[in-house]
């Protein structure tokens, strides 16, 4: 069975600073990997996804993520955060049965 | 723009009531899912469906059932609501790998 660990429950970052959110997964085969963002009171929006190919994936809102098979990781990065990036971020792993397993989430606070 | 619509954003129900949460998608997706979201636990899969009249249990199906009579609609049913079912409920649909989510229903059981 697949599983996801997001080691950081809460991260505070200054506006304009860089951001990195960690994600480690457990899955026997090549995984399908996702990052979603959830603004307060909203559903989840897809930021980016990795299926195969180039291990550095570009997403929306200036985010990118890097798949590292040797470390079972899929960390999310943004070079310069904006106040609107304050949200909760979820990493997810999917299998061929279309089900996704989600991590517990990381809440990002942006300070001025 | 593709959409997954959950009929209620906020719902307050009494213990023991039968509760229906409705989800409709307009993308002709085969796959539909119900998750509940709780702080510190992330999203947990309750039930899913790959086709009309099909349903499969997820990781936490106890206390819930589902109905999928039409392709576009997937209903979550709380047979007898309890306070530990107070949560955010998220519906999602997909054709392949990767979901489109609804905005969620925040259910409070009192």
Image: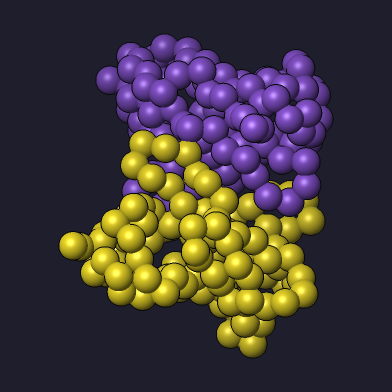
In the rendered image, the quadrant that contains the C terminus of chain A is: bottom left
The relative height of residue B96 versus residue B92 in the rendered view (above or below) is below
Residue at the location (64% across, 32% down)? B1
Q: Is residue A54 visible?
A: yes
- Render colour scheme: by chain
Residue at the location (73% across, 30% down)? B27
Q: Is residue B79 visible?
A: no
Q: Residue furthest bottom?
A: A70
Identify the image quadrant of residue A12: bottom left
Q: Colour of chain A?
A: yellow
The x, y position of residue B107, in whole percent, is: 38, 25
The x, y position of residue B45, in whole percent, is: 57, 43
Identify the image quadrant of residue B73: top right
The x, y position of residue A25, in whole percent, is: 58, 71
The relative height of residue A39 versus residue B106 in the rendered view (above or below) is below
Residue at the location (73% across, 51% down)? B97
Q: Nearer the viewer, residue B92 or A81?
A: A81
Q: Colour of chain B?
A: purple
In the rendered image, the quadrant that contains the N terminus of chain A is: bottom right
Please state if B10 lies on the left or on the right of A31 as rendered: left
Please state if A97 lies on the left or on the right of A36 as rendered: right
């Amino acid at each position: 069975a697949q599983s996801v660990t997001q080691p950081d429950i809460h991260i505070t970052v200054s506006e304009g600073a860089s951001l990195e959110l960690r994600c480690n997964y457990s899955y026997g085969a090549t995984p399908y990997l996702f990052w979603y963002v959830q603004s307060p009171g909203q559903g989840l929006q897809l930021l980016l996804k990795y299926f195969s190919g180039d291990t550095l994936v570009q997403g929306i809102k200036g985010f990118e993520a890097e798949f590292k098979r040797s470390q079972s990781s899929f960390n999310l990065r943004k070079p310069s955060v904006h106040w609107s990036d304050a949200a909760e971020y979820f990493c997810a792993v999917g299998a061929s049965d279309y089900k996704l397993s989600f991590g517990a989430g990381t809440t990002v606070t942006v300070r001025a | 723009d593709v959409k997954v619509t959950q009929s209620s954003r906020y719902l307050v129900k009494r213990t023991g009531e039968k509760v229906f949460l409705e989800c409709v998608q307009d993308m002709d997706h085969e796959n539909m899912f119900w998750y509940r979201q709780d702080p510190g636990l992330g999203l947990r899969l309750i039930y899913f469906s790959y086709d009309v009249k099909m349903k499969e249990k997820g990781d936490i199906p106890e206390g819930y059932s589902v109905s999928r009579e039409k392709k576009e609609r997937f209903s979550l049913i709380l047979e007898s609501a309890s306070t530990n079912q107070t949560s955010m409920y998220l519906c999602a649909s997909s054709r392949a790998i990767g979901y489109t989510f609804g905005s969620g229903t925040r259910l409070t059981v009192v």
